[in-house]
Amino acid sequence: MARKQRAEQWAEYRRQREEEERRQRVMVITEFGAGDPEATMHAMAAAILKYRRALQTLGRAAGPALELRPLFEQFVSEREADGV
């Protein structure tokens, strides 16, 4: 009985997620659908460039953290060796 209920809950969750994704797609289409194909294309290109800039910024922010990883791992292994 519990397994069937879990399966039903999962199916409902999946249905809700798919519906939300569909709504978001419609919103994006509405946002970019300017009626003029060229204007739509330029709006989409601007959004893609904005997304690329955000990813580049994220990459620059993550870089220093990744460089510190070996130091952190060394610190953790030394603490474990000391029994702390």
Image (cartoon, grey):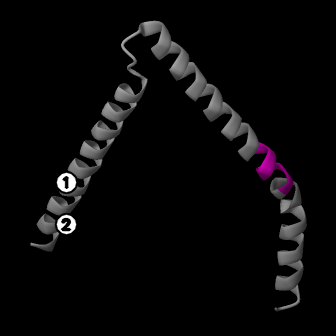
User: Which residue type does callout 1 highlight?
Assistant: Ala
Asked whether disc 1 touches disc 2, contact meaning CB atoms under 8 Å apart, the reply is: no
Residue at the spot x=86%, y=84% of the render?
79
Query: Most extreme residue toward the bottom, as rendered?
Result: 83
Q: Is residue 58 left or right of residue 32?
A: right
Residue at the spot x=70%, y=34% of the render?
53
Q: Earlier in the sequence, mark 1 or mark 2?
A: 2
For the residues labelled 1 and 2, the Cα–Cα distance comes to: 9 Å
Q: Dot 2: few (<14), some (14–19), or many (≥20) neighbours within 10 Å?
A: few
Percent coordinates x, y for residue 8 in the rendering: 14, 60
**First to last magenta residue range:** 59-64
Quadrant housing residue 9:
bottom left
Q: Which residue is mark 1?
A: 11
What mark, if any, has residue 6 been given in the picture?
Answer: 2
Of residue 47 and residue 58, the one placed in the foreground of this image is 47
Of residue 56 and residue 79, the one placed in the foreground of this image is 56
Percent coordinates x, y for residue 34 in the rendering: 40, 18
Q: Secondary structure at mark 2?
A: helix
Q: Is residue 57 left or right of residue 82?
A: left
Q: Secondary structure at mark 1?
A: helix
Q: Is residue 41 above or below residue 12?
A: above
